[in-house]
Amino acid sequence: MSAATRAAEALIARLGEEDGYAHVQRLVQSRAIPQIRGSALAVYLGHRFGPAPDGLAEELVQEYLRYLLEEFLPRLGEHPDLVTAILEGQPNKVLRRALDLFLWKLRDAARKKDNNPRAYLYRRVQGVLREDSRFRLTDDGWHYLPADVDGEPIRDPAAFSGLEYGSWPAPPDLGTTRDTLFTAAYLAKAARVFHRLAADRLGPGVTVPVKELARYLAAHVGWLDRLQPLQLTDDLPLAAEIDTMEEQVGRTMAMPSIAVLAVQFAMGMDETARRIFYWRLGDPPLPFREIAERLGLPDHNRTYRIYSQTEKAMRKFVSHWSGPPLAELPDDVGLAFIEELRKICKRSVSWP
């Protein structure tokens, strides 16, 4: 019998103990529900399980256990560190990791067109305009301008504040197929129409926020807003107030996943890199020379090179993670990733 098989059987045996199910219930309540509350994932779960918050946690327990037994444990051999953790009597570590992966899978489902069409539309518009040479997208990816518009671009996001697009002329006709809305041809045509309407009111050189194009389309395509955020409790609010759903999508698609992404990146760091990263992010940061002395390295150049390599690896990692690029997300998403990584480096290192 392989180590992975023995570990899987040990974990199943733990779940079969008298308090096994109650333990999973507590884990979901304490670890999953806070991540879901006020997030874009709550929209998807409200649609999938119904809007009753009392039943959501129990539905998640059932779904999580199904994922654990049918998907996670059969592939446990791919994670030798988790196999070791179970065999060394640390099943909770594995249950937490599996829950994080389960939530990540749910978030992926929540981003799909059929489950959350408005969130999908927002990302689709950005992708189309970025690839279409007939448009110019600003460096941050938040505003666009048709390429053939003459004159100095005018960037004035405040000019769009409070505009009600329901009374504006309708976008191009969708015909009889919903999926037409997400095609590159349709979105390019709609982007021109919306820019022309905005230019009539605000001036020909105005750069249009991508989120406003999505909001304009949603005002005329009723089924885009068929899902509503799920309030998980009466006394805890949804995510911090944000001007539009598109801005909320940008934040809520990323923030709950930050901890998992930080763990994923940290797994590729050795102990020395973690120590250097943690000490350099101190307040104040330790000089490279002092870090070298603490670690017994030859000189400060060595610590500097390790830190630089970590920074380079991090930039590559965040440029390829799932969801919108970091440059298109609110600043606090990047800061949250750094803070999570700093915490991991702090608790994962045995200090000298």
Image (spheres, rainbow, N blue to C red):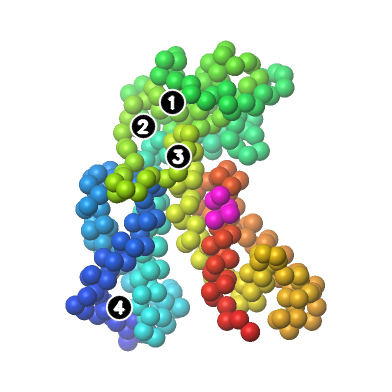
Q: Is residue 20 above or below residue 89?
A: above
Q: Which mark is residue 241?
A: 3
Q: Residue at x 37, y 52 (%)?
A: 36
Q: Nearer the viewer, residue 12 or 54?
A: 54
Residue located farthest toward the left when viewing the structure as drawn:
18
Q: Start and end of the magenta stretch?
A: 332-336
Real-space CA distance between mark 1 and mark 2, rounded to the nearest whole angstrom? 9 Å
Q: Earlier in the sequence, mark 4 or mark 2?
A: 4
Label 3 close to label 1 by CB (< 8 Å): no
Element type where label 3 sits in the image: loop
The reply to whether residue 4 is visible in this rendering is: no
Q: Residues within 10 Å of mark 1 (few under 14, many from 20)?
A: many
Residue type marked 4: Leu
- Observer-side mark, 4 or 3, equals 3
334 part of magenta stretch: yes
Residue topped by disc 2: 224
Real-space CA distance between mark 4 and mark 2, rounded to the nearest whole angstrom? 42 Å
Q: Earlier in the sequence, mark 3 or mark 1?
A: 1
- Tell me the quarter of the image containing the C terminus: bottom right
Q: Residue at x 25, y 49 (%)?
A: 53
Residue type marked 1: Leu
Could you tell me residue 245's position as x and y percent?
Answer: 44, 36
Element type where label 4 sits in the image: helix
